[in-house]
Image (cartoon, rainbow, N blue to C red):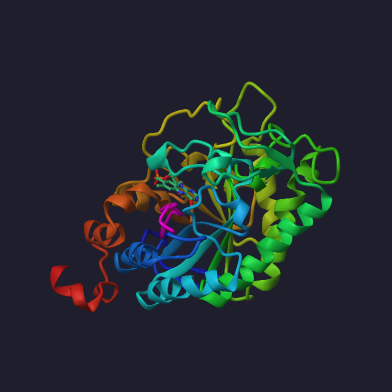
Amino acid sequence: MTDDLFTPLTLRGTEIRNRVMVSPMCQYSCDRDGLATDWHRVHLGSRAVGGAGVVMAEATAVESRGRITPQDLGIWSDEHADALAPVAEFVREHGAVPAIQLAHAGRKASKTPPRDGSRPLGPDEGGWETVAPSAEPYPYDDEPPATRRLDRGDVEDVIDSFEAAAERALAAGFEVAEVHAAHGYLLHEFLSPVTNRRDDEYGGSFEDRARIVREVTRRVRAVWPDGKPVFVRVSATDWLPDRESWTVDDTARLAGLLAEDGADLIDVSAGGIHPDQQVPHGGPNYQVPYAERVAEGTDAAVGAVGGITTAQQADAVVRNDRADLAVVGREHLRDPYFALHAAEALDALDRADVPVQYRRGF
Ligand code: FNR
């Protein structure tokens, strides 16, 4: 039988009630030091109430200098895990699998949120030194913050931070840990020859550029229970066809290795490494072909994200075996009940998935 959008998906021992995942989306809503607030509980909780199978919390920084903006979530202390625990609990109570994206922004850290222009923070407004594989700042129009090259010991510290963050995420009650290796942030900066100019074991060849993300994945996997899945989000391509850069073929190869390292699902996005990127178009399903290509290279499941906005589209992605999970971002900002509405539209509504308080509305 063909799987469809409402066929449950079991990864390791974890059953996901349908194939809709809320894509991680920064909310820039921390009042203080990366601690979750009521906003995060209401925002993520609403999407669990709305029927999604997996509700993924935004890029959550494994160390404070790894935040994109000072308003990002963090998970670099037990206090952070305590603040996130009610979020995970509410999501789980409402039938969704609570997930968290573990992130480090690398040289794209220390910015203002989009509502303030996404520009680099100056030192007099709380900006900080960013870190990257090489000492080259992101080429902003404005003066960028200083970027320091991580030395060998610093790389070890970053890997340790991902592991400690995973341990805290588990303690907070999350059931999926996603390693953020996409969108031009730290781990992607190691993968791409555009940003990695190292000549030690963390740069140069494909194997050496891929070393850190593989080590992070193995370390997260080692502390994550056998029955719970680990995801990795990748940028399938740098969208820089005219220069040596990270390609879809590289991603397919990496995805095969990540499956060996214990990744259960590759969440396939694209871009973000450099402002010269040539985004082909942003229409319906614009990144789904990358997920299909990446699936050819790996035994892991695959998620497709980008321009999935309707029930029929999401269903077709799964039905036509283009991906195992339909990952929906901005449509979830417009409609927290996307999954319930999709179930109605596809005549697949299970009333048990409608919160009892809302059943008379469906
Ligand atoms: C994002 N995106 C994103 N991606 C990610 O991996 N981690 C993150 O924290 C964020 N944050 C974020 C915030 C906001 C407001 C938006 C709109 C997007 C990217 C997002 O997860 C998704 O990949 C893209 O939006 C494309 O999918 P849609 O929106 O076309 O479904």
Q: Which of 174 and 140 is in front in this view?
A: 140
For the record, the magenta segment spans: 20-30
Which residue does the image show at 80% across and 41% down from the upper left? 203
Residue 328 colored in magenta in the image: no
Q: Residue furthest toward the front? A: 124
86 relative position to 275: left or right: left
Which residue does the image show at 69% across and 47% down from the upper left? 254
Residue 25 colored in magenta in the image: yes
Q: Report x, y in % for residue 330.
A: 35, 47
Q: Report x, y in % for residue 266.
A: 57, 54
Which residue does the image show at 46% across and 53% down from the upper left? 71
Q: In this view, does 248 lie above or below 151?
A: above
Q: Can residue 351 be seen in this view?
A: yes
**Which of the 4 image quadrants contains residue 30?**
bottom left
Q: Residue furthest toward the right? A: 200
Q: Main secondary structure of the magenta part?
A: loop
Q: Residue furthest toward the left? A: 360
